[in-house]
Image: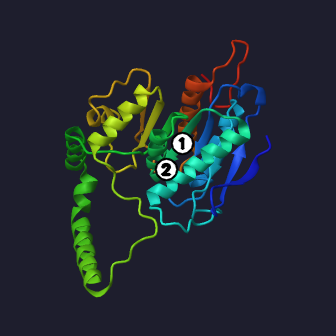
Amino acid sequence: MMEKAVVFGSGAVRLVGIVTPAAEPQTTAGRPVIIMLNAGLLHRVGPYRLHVHLARELAAIGFTVLRFDLSGIGDSTIRTDRLSEMERSNQDLRDAINFMSNSFQATEFVLFGLCSGAANAHRGALLDARVSGAVFLDGYAYPTSGYRLRRFASHITSAEKWAALPRKLTRSLKHSLANKQRQQTASTIRLKYDFGTPPPRHQVEQEIKSLTKRGVNLLYIYSGGWEGYNHVKQFKEMYQSIDFSDRVQVEYFAQAEHTYPLREDRKKLQRCVCLWIEEKFARLSPTQNLHVEGVKK
């Protein structure tokens, strides 16, 4: 497979990405293009090259993939307009979808994002009717009564956490005093990139319902390293009015860290994503039998 660097964008901004074409081009008819968004400030390779390996596995099962840098990240130029960070990411994603639509005659898209990338994918799915699916890694999470009970139970039953409590209290006090001193002696510095606070839970719940009503397929994967989420059933606790049916799938990898530093965790994640995308979007004829090593049904 020949991956290709591409440059696109609107106005003066130039966005840089890598297109990984499907290994069998004849299989792409009627299939969506996968678009991968930056995870935080990491460039398009993703944490521990997660995006690179996943893009190639998806290409091996017949999907074209674009992984690109938002403006101001990696090789993409910085926007000089007065758009907010949220508006910039929305425009960047719109430019990416338009580029792939024009260059590859794509009519449908599946978005993939980790952390802030999941938030950007959520907004992108809402704003563009061409999005027919999305994969959210450690997306929005809201504490529930079940979450609080599970967290409390894990603390009171852990001897290690009890032993570490004095140390944590001392460290917390030191941090509190240091923060107070900094606020008194230095001006507040506004970070260029502010991923902000999540929208209200009820708003996200209604937005998920609107996506499923539109026919968008959604895969939510949470890791054990994501603060604010500690059990697979928490998703239903957060969004009790959502009809899961066959549009929403939720997975919880309790042993995985947020950025998947361990190879076995990355492979498990990649296998899950590939199987889900193949199941929802492959649209294969009965004579076709595509698979990638380690990603078999």
Residue at horizontal 32 percent and vertical 49 percent from the top? 199
CA distance for labels 2 and 1: 7 Å
Instruction: Please provide percent x and percent y for residue 10.
Output: 63, 56
- Three-letter amino acid code at the position of disc 1: Phe
Instruction: Kindly give the residue lying farthest to the bottom in the view shown.
Output: 185
Answer with the quarter of the image where residue 184 lies.
bottom left
- Three-letter amino acid code at the position of disc 2: Gly
Residue at horizontal 20 percent and vertical 47 percent from the top? 152
Residue at horizontal 22 percent and vertical 73 percent from the top? 173
Question: For this view, does 241 lie left or right of residue 258?
Answer: left
* SS for callout 1: strand
- Residue 117 is tagged as 2
Answer with the quarter of the image where residue 100 lies.
top right
Q: Nearer the viewer, residue 108 or 232?
A: 108
Question: For this view, does 244 lie left or right of residue 129?
Answer: left
Where is mark 1, residue-wise?
Answer: 112
Q: Nearer the viewer, residue 5 or 97?
A: 97
Q: Quadrant of the C terminus?
A: top right
Colour convention of the picture: rainbow
Instruction: Kindly give the residue lying farthest to the top in the view shown.
Output: 286
Instruction: Kindly give the residue lying farthest to the front in the view shown.
Output: 11
* SS for callout 2: helix
Identify the mark nearer the N-term, 2 or 1.
1
Residue at horizontal 60 percent and vertical 56 percent from the top? 69
Instruction: Please provide percent x and percent y for residue 236.
Output: 30, 31
